[in-house]
Amino acid sequence: TMHRNLDLLNRIGYLTQAEESFLFKIQAYLEFKSNVIICREDKFKKKRKNVIEDDFELPKSATVSDIAEIIGKSRKNTSIIMNSLKEKEILLNPEGAGQVTENGRSVSPRTWIVNPYIMICAPRKNEVKLDKLTMRLFQHSLKKLKDQNGKKVNLPVRFF
C-alpha cells in the first residue's frame, strides 16, 4: 500500500467505506509486477521446480464474479464498487480480444488492474520494477484530484 497517497485520499474523502474495504480485501490477489487482479487458485498455486520456459502458464485474470467471491459480496454490488473505482482512476479494465462465457453469457474478457499509486505488488528498493505496460496505463492517472473545497491536490508519491 502506498501509505502517503492513501493518507491523502483519506484526508480528502476520496474513497467510500465500501471502496476501501474492496481494496483491502483484493490486495492479496494482485499479480506480481503487473497489479492485475488474478484468480485465487492461480495466486496461491505452488510453482513447479525445473519448469521449461515453453511450459509457462499465464495466471487467469479474475472476472467480476471471481472477485465477488473473493471479497464475499454479490456480483451486482461488486460491479458497482468496481465501476466507481474505475471512474476514480483506481481500477482500470482494458478490454481483451475474443469472448468468454461468464454466468451463461458471452462477454469480452477483461483484465482488472489496480492503480500502483495506491497499491503496488512489485519490488521497490531503489526503483520500481513494475511492468512497463502497467506504468504506461497509469502514468497520467490521479492528476485531477480535488479536496472537499474544490482545491487541486497532488499525490505525495509519484514514481513513474
Image (spheres, rainbow, N blue to C red):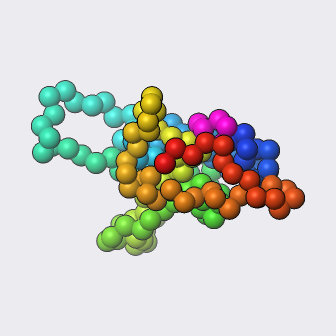
Name the residue located 79 percent from the left edge and 50 percent from the top edge: 12
Q: Position of residue 34 (x, y in %)?
A: 41, 47
Q: Which residues are magenta?
A: 1-5
Is residue 51 shown left or right of residue 25?
left
Q: Is residue 103 above or below residue 121?
A: below
Is residue 112 shown left or right of residue 10?
left
Q: Position of residue 156 (x, y in %)?
A: 66, 43
Q: Is residue 28 above or below residue 136?
A: above
When asked about the image quadrant of residue 40, the answer is top left
On-image quarter of the N terminus: top right
Is residue 148 shown left or right of residue 112?
right
Name the residue located 45 percent from the left edge and 46 percent from the top edge: 35
Q: Residue furthest right?
A: 149
Question: Could one spot residue 25 in this view of the protein?
Answer: no
Question: Could one spot residue 87 in this view of the protein?
Answer: yes
Any magenta on residue 2? yes
Q: Is residue 99 above or below residue 81?
A: below
Q: Position of residue 41 (x, y in %)?
A: 39, 40
Q: Is residue 90 above or below residue 157?
A: below
Name the residue located 31 percent from the left edge and 71 percent from the top edge: 98
Name the residue located 83 percent from the left edge and 62 percent from the top edge: 150
How many labels were placed on the picture?
A: 0
Any magenta on residue 20? no
When asked about the image quadrant of residue 148, the answer is bottom right
Instruction: Name the magenta segment's main secondary structure.
Output: helix
